[in-house]
Image (spheres, coloured by chain):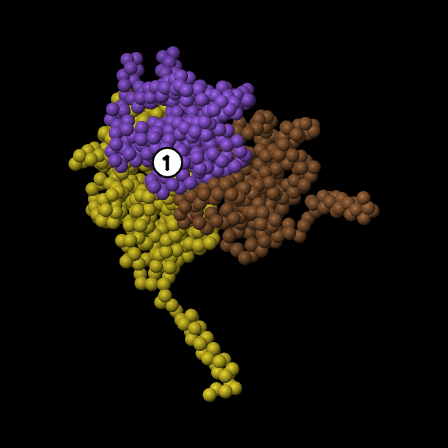
Amino acid sequence: MHAVTEAAISIGFHGLAFAMVLYLISVGLSVTMGLMGLVNLAHAVFAMLGGYVLTALMNRWGVPYAVSLAGAAAAAALASVPLERLLYRRLYGGEELDQVLLTMGIIFMSVAGVTYVWGPLNQPVYLPHWLDGQIDFGFRHFPTYRSFLILCGAVLVTLLWLALERTRFGAQIRAAVDNLRMAQSIGINTSRLFTLTFALGSGLAGLGGALGADFLPISPSYALSNLVYFIIVVAVGGLGSIRGPFVAALLIGIADTGFKYLLPELGAFFIYALTMALLLWRPHGLFGRA
Amino acid sequence: MLGRHWRLAALAAAIVLGAGVLDAGLAPTRADTTVKIGIINSYSGFVAQAADEMQKGIDLYVKEHTKDLPAGVKIEIIKRDDTSNPEVGKRIAQELITRDHVQLLAGVILSPVAAAVAPLTAEAKVPFVLTNAAGVSIPRLSPYVVRTSFTLWQQCAPIGKWAAEQGWKTAFTGATDFIAGHDAEGGFTKGFTDGGGKIVGKVNFPVQNPDFVPFVQRIKDAKPDVAFLWVPAQTQATAMMKAVRDIGLREAGIAITSAQDLLPDEELQNMGDVIEGLITAGNYSTAAKRPANDAFLAAWNKEYGGKTIPDFFSVDGWDGMAAIFDLVIAKKGQFTPEEAMDFLSHWKNPNSPRGPISIDPETRDIVQNIYIRKVEKVDGTLANVEIATIPNVKDPWKELNPAK
Amino acid sequence: MTVKDLDRARSDRNGAIEAFARRHRFRPLEAVPWVAALAAAFVFPGYLPLGAQILATILFVMSADLVVGYAGIVTLGHAAFFGTGAYTAGILAAHGWGEPLSGLVAAAAVSALIGFLSGLVILRTTGLALLMQTLVVAAMLLETANKASSITGGDDGLQGVDVWPIFGVFHFDMFGRVAYGYCLGVLLVGWLVTRQIVHSPFGRSLTGMRENVRRMHAIGAPVFRRRLVVYTISAALAGVSGGLIAQTTQFVGLTSLSLERSGNALIMLTIGGVGRLYGAFIGVPLYMIAQDQFAEIEPVYWYFWIGLLMVAVVMFARGGIIGLVERFRR
């Protein structure tokens, strides 16, 4: 019995840490896909960029960890603006194939770009000393870094929900997701809203990529290797919501960790099967709308 | 002057010119004999760092010893990238053979790539000097394969035996899920169980796995006496040791051991003090004390400016080129595939940076000393210090499984 | 109206009917790719292995065109069927049945089955949801192949693929001569099948579904069923192309099921021209030859230019090369 609870706690803890990172990266994708009708496969590029900025700031210029995290988020958010204004804007509500090709092209160019600047190898991440080792929670020890991730994630999620529910900006987003034409006709500047939302989503992704750099290694193939995970979170969670991806990320994060722990021979297979089953039941995701 | 006999004159001139050209062409040329060598390495992909170490070792040997080639004999090296992918490796091997007409193939980091390339060498009769991939049965896939690096059983069986001798009764093995990982855990299991130990659990990591924490957590929860952890060297090893540190595996009283891949020399500083005292088995350590190694390190630092540390990949590449150069020098650049294989199968180097090595003609695999090493601080930096030597180890797997 | 007007109208109408009835007959221009392929074998004898791979990939991309270009189902998971076919043919050959033609039939059958089953599930949706589901199906198959490593070889790849000579006579050699002819023959058959589908009423209804699905529902066309049929057929063709690669390279790796492969298929198709039957014939050789020549030199630049090309094509040249040619002619 004791061994089972041990295992359950281990899985729950690590799964939660993984889920936080998944959520931070995917929430932006869900909102932009729901809001702008754009399948942005290149979303993970911003997470990757955040990771590269973090390691560059810390390794090259010795910038402290917390500042580097902020820098990563800011860099990703800023980089998203020209991309949105110049390229993505033209494809809103357009042909899916076009969107797929364009975003694939962007992924390829970003792969080339980061390889050119930083080389093809994984970027080493040197966490600050205060994140090393373990924390004693009384009944058990847990790795400090993972605990930090969970804490950060919880804080950010709360802030995000508050922003969406309690601010005017949040209300505008919700309105535009529900009914874009109506939102436009009551005077919401949807064009500016898109740019800001895109930047927010990308910034969060950058932060997620930087926070998760320890177990989602920062390398040129980041955007392609991890794409399926983020897509699954969004597909299961539902487009245009911020609650949906959270539940989905929890499910996926804990299930993935659980299978790695208990049944590593099966790997991620069950995650995919679970996803297909959920999508069969709710084709638009758990919290999505038709 | 020539008038209407200009045609005749032109014909005569042409004949003279033609004869001259023909004469030059038929004369035995003191022009160069060029030996073309195709090097297949993983310049990109998840083992790119190891590939870089191996390439540096290869390049260094070529640079130092080109002057030893006989007059008129040149070596031409064609490098191709297998992108850490067996499919690509097979294709570029085919192209090297059919398009570039190489006489020898060399290199290859990954065992699956080597396994894909080997059948081609048999069909085309091209000798293949394998300078890293350590899957035990690869030389059996083709009579044209000779290996200068090591086999995983050569290292993991002795360390398994050593682990049992320490009084550890139970072990949990974790290894990456491909040929090399399977061989590693197989070798350790044999050595450990022969010594009276029991394997209480085993786990396999996905090949490009970034996050070892859940796996290490599981090992910690299982509470074995010792954990055998094998991953392909370089960044995976560092990630593994990070997980070990974060989960507190050693603090929980679980010993850790492996082959040299877990503690590659150039990653030691990145891993931090958690690795102090760990014992592994390997064929080369940068901290080894012998004259050949001192000379090698001096040449290395001169060429690469002290910015990189050589490890076993580098030395295995170095020795591979040594074998090839010895062949070219002995045969003056002209040899048939059979002559090459005959020479290479009987090749010896008593003076390698790793000690005396030779090829076993029966298996075409390497015979070398295996060292038990311990991580200690030498002048303030972490190093793999050799504490015991097992001399002239042949590949145990082939001894236990003779070819039919 | 005069009699002359009526006569002219009648001849116009007859002309139009004639043209319509004749449109699917073979035109001389359509022989060009085949002649070029045969000629290439003699002009570039050292490049036959690459040539064989190009031919097999043309079949793969053409099958993707059926789904993406004609039926309007955007998929990023077509490699699932390619890989299924490759592993089917490869596993058969590695376990004692190396007859190539029956191996291809098996590959087609298994891929068609997977196509049918996955289509049943995912073709109910459209748009973004469908796209994401194609990704998930492919990822699932990739993971299965990865984990079932005792059968598939996992990350090591499927070793020991031993393909028997075709008809007992033509043995697959390292230089790719037999492979080239084999792939060319199979591609010809696949092309005939695809061409037949595209020019048939069934094919026309696919275009209708792509352009205006509501209208098709309104006129009573069985949309779901037709999409499922074309998806299954396309999966079968993709499976055959995978089997070809497995048999001619005598190796199957996990990359045959990868996202990169699906993505590359779309890229090659777009370069040539989507939904125009011959897009694959133009896009695939261009891409693969360029990749063979340039990607080795500096992979970084290769990725960059391909990415830029994609962005440029979407912005300026949506119809690919065939589209540009059409525009030019006007």
Specify the amino acid type for callout 1: Ser
Q: Quarter-wise, where is residue B250 in the image?
A: top left
Residue furthest left as drawn = B379
C66 sits to left or right of B400: right
* Chain coloured purple here: A
Asked whether the viewer can see residue C216, the reply is yes
Residue furthest top as drawn = A1
Which residue is label 1 attached to?
A219
* Chain coloured yellow here: B
Question: Residue drawn at (29%, 30%), measured in percent from left and top?
Answer: A68
Q: Which class describes the residues within 10 Å of circle 1: few (<14), some (14-19), or many (20+)?
A: many
The residue lying toward the viewer, choosing from C277 and A183, is A183
Horizontal and vertical percent for residue C80? Answer: 53, 34
The residue lying toward the viewer, choosing from C226 and A35, is A35
Which shade of the palette goes to chain C?
brown
A81 sits to left or right of C78: left
Callout 1: SS: loop
Question: Residue drawn at (58%, 55%), measured in percent from left and top?
Answer: C39
Where, quadrant-wise, is the N terminus of chain A in this rendering? Answer: top left
**Disc 1 sits on a residue from what chain?**
A
Horizontal and vertical percent for residue B169? Answer: 31, 23
Horizontal and vertical percent for residue B241? Answer: 30, 29
- Above or below, C236 relative to A154: below
Question: Residue drawn at (67%, 50%), measured in percent from left and top?
Answer: C27
